Image: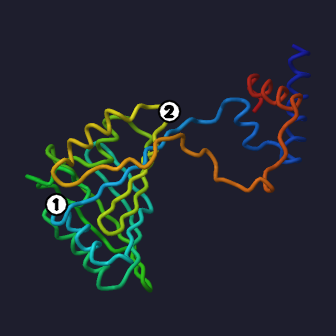
Amino acid sequence: MLVALLFGMFALVFLDAILRESFLDSTFLRACSIRFVMREFVFTLAYDPGTNAVADVLSAAPDTRIQSLSCHVSAEHLWRVDHITGSETVRDDIVTAVTDGDYYPDCLARRDCDADWQTQVLDESGDTLVIYSYWTRTPSCMSIPHLALEHFGDGLIFETTWTERRYEWRVIVPGNPEFSAFHDDLTAEIAETTGVEIRRITNAPALPERDIDDQEPALSPEQDAALCAAVDAGYY
């Protein structure tokens, strides 16, 4: 009992010293194998003329861009916030295409889509516009986030960039999944409207990239062993 108490006191004191010296960084997290592994799948859809109202508007305005600020999905809903840059006329045309279209722009099914959605302008200043959309799908509806949810489950991150007819998606998935089945199902869903260009499949960066000169010093083997032992003992 006394030995365990002494070890605990030593571990806490040592951790405090490490923290003050700013040694407890990503190097330690990686060394102790507690970093969460994630994979990313980046691909682009290229819509044919007349198959997507938003793509048709963007194709005539090459300087306009739609960038997602957030995109979330549940089994029955999709909601997202997007940042649009471009002229006021084009921005208004995009809002009209999203709001008054025959189907929600992210719906892959398109036909027999009686889904409900709403779009609201959150902010407008200068040459930028921020809009919020909330979509309730029907049994016939499908979207890329819903397809990803079916294949990979919860915990997904979505990023999108839309310029002209090219709609790029970045899907970040926890763990180490296989993307082949997801890719096959996606290709089947959009076969009549567009194609899929795979950009990359790789491990998602765990931390923002920094210059080598900005990296903090790595732990010594002794420091690494002591900190890992403290984590295993429950002191961290």
- Secondary structure, mark 1, is loop
Give residue 175's mark: 2
Compare residues 40 and 197 and report the one nearer the observer: 197
**Image quarter in which the N terminus is found:** top right
Question: Residue 9 at what x, y percent from top left?
Answer: 89, 28
Question: Residue 40 at what x, y percent from top left?
Answer: 47, 43
- Secondary structure, mark 2, is loop
State the residue lying farthest toward the left: 112
Residue shown at 41% from the left, 62% from the top:
68
Residue position for label 1: 103
Residue type, numbered disc 1:
Tyr
User: Which colour style is shown?
Assistant: rainbow
- Relative placement, left or right, of 42 versus 100 is right
Residue shown at 39% from the left, 71% from the top:
65
Compare residues 220 and 130 and report the one nearer the observer: 220
Compare residues 14 and 42 and report the one nearer the observer: 42
Res. 66 image quadrant: bottom left
User: Which class describes the residues within 10 Å of circle 1: few (<14), some (14-19), or many (20+)?
Assistant: many
Question: Residue 91 at what x, y percent from top left?
Answer: 32, 79
